Structures are given as structure tokens and as C-alpha cells.
Amino acid sequence: MKRGDILLIGLIIVIAAVFLVPRWLDGSSSEKYHNETRVAKITVDGELFRTVELTGEEQTIEIKTEYGYNLLKVHDYGIEMIDADCPDKVCLTFGFIERNGGTIVCLPHKLLVEIEGPSGEGDEIDAVVK
């Protein structure tokens, strides 16, 4: 290896470190939310069914209504739908949500799960399209 090769490798390492170090200092998303109280509001047919605090402890919530059955799982300061008896199962594709404004919707069962928490995070506009 020549002197130029070593300089090029060193430059690439420095540039990579500039992008990676801020991510390490920021911490993971679940660590950021430990001190913030977040809740998931569960509504069925427009009426509040239950409000659940999002914690690190694992818990399951069964929702049995005249419209059908849904099973939610709270863990890692977020929530996800893990089972439903609706015909299309689209609600299972929303995945794990943990940010303000995150939603899970099951239209056949008229079910809505929405995360609410401290204002300021997740409330901003993502983009404006003209």
C-alpha cells in the first residue's frame, strides 16, 4: 500500500464516523421514550373502548365486540395487533407502532388504535405537496 491508499482509507473511515457517531449518541427509539408517558386510545365504532399506557412490560388486550375479535400486544413502549378474525387481516400489516399519531385500523371491526403522548414529537408536518 502506498501513502495515497492509506490517506484514502483514513478519509473514508472519518466520513463514515461522521454519520454513525450521532446515531450512537442519540440512543435507540425505545430508550428515548422511557421517561415519556404514552398511551394508546382504543376506540370501537367511534366510542372509547379503553386507554392503555405503553410500557416496557408485555401485556395482551383482548377486544371482543359485536363486530368481531382483535388481540393487541403492548411491549417495548409500543403496541401491535397480533390477531384478528376479520376476513382481510389488513390490520395485522400495520406492525408495531410507538410514535405519536401512529395508528392501527381494522375497518370490518370498526376498531381504531391511536398513540397519544407528549406534544412536540410526531406532531410536526412531514411534507407539503402542491
Image (cartoon, rainbow, N blue to C red):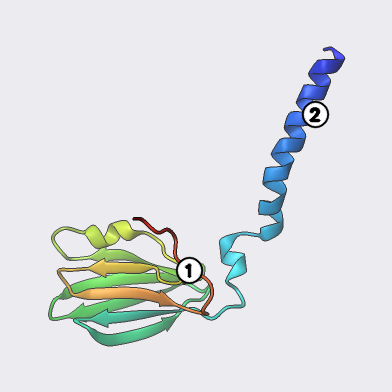
Residue 97 at what x, y percent from top left? 42, 65
- Residue in view at x 82 percent, y 21 percent: 6
Mark 2 lies on a secondary structure that is helix
**Residue type beneath disc 2:** Gly
* Residue receiving disc 1: 124
Residue 19 at what x, y percent from top left? 67, 44
Left or right, 76 with reference to 8: left
Front position in the image: 1 or 124: 124
Residue 46 at what x, y percent from top left? 22, 83
**Residue type beneath disc 1:** Glu
Left or right, 114 with reference to 8: left
Work out whether 128 lies above or below 7. below
Closer to the observer: label 2 or label 1? 1
Residue 102 at what x, y percent from top left? 39, 68
- Residue in view at x 72 percent, y 49 percent: 21
Residue sitting at the far front: 130
Q: Classify 10 Å Cα crowding around label 2: few (below 14), some (14-19), many (20 and above).
A: few
Q: Check if mark 2's residue and mark 1's residue have beta carbons within 8 Å.
A: no
Mark linked to residue 10: 2
Work out whether mark 2 precedes mark 1 in sequence or the reverse, and give the earlier one: 2
Left or right, 6 with reference to 83: right
Residue sitting at the far right: 3
Label 2 – label 1 distance at C-alpha: 39 Å
- Residue in view at x 82 percent, y 23 percent: 7
Front position in the image: 122 or 65: 122
Q: Where the C terminus falls, by quadrant?
A: bottom left
